[in-house]
Image: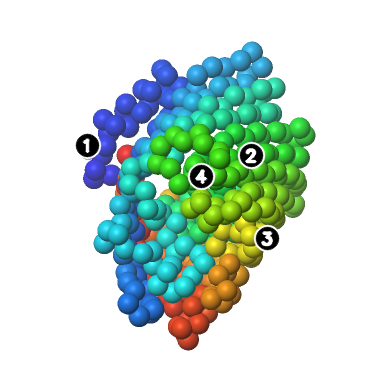
């Protein structure tokens, strides 16, 4: 790694913190440049985004039954260029975000969480500022927008209510009553998703959800099947002073680790229109390959499906996305990403639209 002299002091400090303090760090900077082959009149066809991330997880206590107490703090600084521009999704009428790294927040506290394990960590209770997607509807093969898929329909979903979509104040539990059965639950603030710090106000809506999953062997390889339900009394209009609404949402995900490096998956989500985020239903399938073609750190993904938009002015959008990630040095990865929108959400664009992206991630 040619940058080893610069990053070694940081990594040595991280190793010391783990050995003597039970503390881990995740520090990186990720940049994305994305461009469209076509866009609506008067809208942008390209933009750049940058994210600097620092996260620390501290093991505070280990109980006699080997359960743990963990404290997590995570900050991000975000920029997009040009400033004050609309996201590229609006340039094609897409219900899906085309770049999951993009956010309107500048510097933001995204996690401030205390997690307490019990019964050999078969039950963990977390409270603070959380990401509800850590506990519900999590697809492990499409969960990291800095190294996997960029489209939000693959990296999460655009269906579950606003209280699910982002980092917010709340509480959650994860339970493993049997080796093959888990149950998770979460309750979170809808208004908290709009804050950059810690805002415990729940007066503008709440999201609550439960998930149950099975862990099964198929041909000697692990298969995870999960279903989740969520309910909310808020949507995006509620957070702007609109009336309370009530509705439900559902998801189903299948994830199969076919080999040590290859995962196959399928996911579906649907919600009542009054609480749906930007789409009322989405269905996606795909594959994710690590150590692609025998290269350590390289990765390949191919996925796609459809999104039915909440807006009546848009049409159902088809999506195919593929990426290839190259491990250039021990610190740097470069990814090439292409998304085919066929058709795009806006019927003012008659043909397919291609969104191409170049992503660079530097890990400290």
Local SS, label 3: loop
- The CA distance from mark 4 to mark 1 is 44 Å
Q: Please determine whether, in this image, residue 208 is positioned above or below residue 121.
A: below
Which is more N-terminal, label 2 or label 3? 2
Q: Is residue 81 visible?
A: no
Dot in front, 3 or 2: 3
**Which residue is located at x 46 percent, y 32 percent?**
112
Q: Return the residue at label 1.
A: 5
Cβ atoms at labels 3 and 2 below 8 Å apart = no
Q: Which mark is residue 191?
A: 4
**How far apart, in angstroms, are the residues tagged by discs 3 and 2?**
19 Å
Sequence-first disc among 4 and 2:
2
Mark linked to residue 272: 3
Q: Which mark is residue 244?
A: none
Quadrant in the picture for residue 5: top left
Nearer the N terminus, badge 4 or badge 1? Answer: 1
- Tell me the quarter of the picture where residue 287 sits: bottom right
* Relative horizontal placement of residue 98, taking residue 267 as reference (left or right): left
Badge 1 crowding class, 10 Å Cα cut-off, few under 14, some 14 to 19, many 20 or more, is few
Q: Nearer the viewer, residue 243 or 98?
A: 243
Q: CA distance from mark 4 to mark 3?
A: 19 Å
Q: Is residue 162 visible?
A: yes
Tag 2 residue: 186
In contact (CB < 8 Å): disc 4 and disc 3: no
């Amino acid at each position: 790694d040619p940058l080893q002299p610069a990053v070694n002091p940081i990594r040595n400090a991280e190793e010391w913190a783990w050995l003597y303090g039970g503390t881990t760090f995740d520090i990186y900077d990720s940049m994305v440049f994305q461009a469209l082959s076509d866009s609506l009149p008067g809208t942008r066809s390209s933009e750049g985004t940058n994210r600097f991330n620092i996260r620390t997880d501290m093991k505070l206590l280990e109980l006699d039954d080997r359960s743990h107490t963990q404290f997590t703090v995570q900050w991000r600084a975000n920029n997009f260029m040009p400033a004050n521009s609309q996201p590229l999704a609006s340039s094609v009428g897409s219900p899906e975000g085309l770049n999951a790294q993009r956010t309107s927040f500048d510097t933001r506290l995204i996690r401030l969480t205390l997690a307490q394990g019990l019964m050999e960590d078969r039950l963990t209770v977390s409270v603070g500022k959380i990401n509800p997607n850590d506990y519900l509807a999590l697809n492990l093969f499409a969960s990291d927008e800095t190294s996997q898929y960029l489209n939000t329909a693959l990296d999460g979903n655009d269906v579950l209510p606003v209280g699910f979509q982002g980092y917010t104040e709340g509480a959650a539990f994860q339970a493993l009553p049997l080796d093959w059965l888990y149950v998770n639950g979460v309750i979170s603030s809808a208004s908290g998703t709009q804050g950059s710090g810690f805002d415990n106000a729940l007066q503008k809506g709440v999201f609550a959800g439960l998930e149950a999953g099975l862990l099964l062997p198929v041909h000697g390889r692990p298969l995870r099947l999960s279903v989740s339900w969520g309910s909310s009394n808020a949507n995006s209009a509620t957070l702007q002073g609109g009336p309370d609404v009530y509705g439900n949402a559902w998801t189903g995900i299948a994830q199969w680790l076919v080999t040590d490096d290859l995962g196959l998956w399928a996911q579906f989500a649907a919600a009542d229109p009054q609480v749906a985020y930007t789409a009322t239903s989405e269905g996606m399938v795909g594959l994710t390959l690590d150590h692609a073609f025998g290269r350590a750190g390289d990765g390949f993904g191919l996925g796609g499906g459809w999104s039915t938009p909440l807006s009546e002015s848009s049409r159902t959008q088809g999506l195919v996305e593929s990426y290839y990630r190259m491990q250039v040095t021990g610190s740097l990865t470069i990814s090439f990403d292409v998304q085919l929108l066929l058709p795009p959400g806006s019927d003012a664009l008659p043909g397919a639209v291609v969104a191409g992206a170049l992503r660079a991630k530097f890990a400290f």
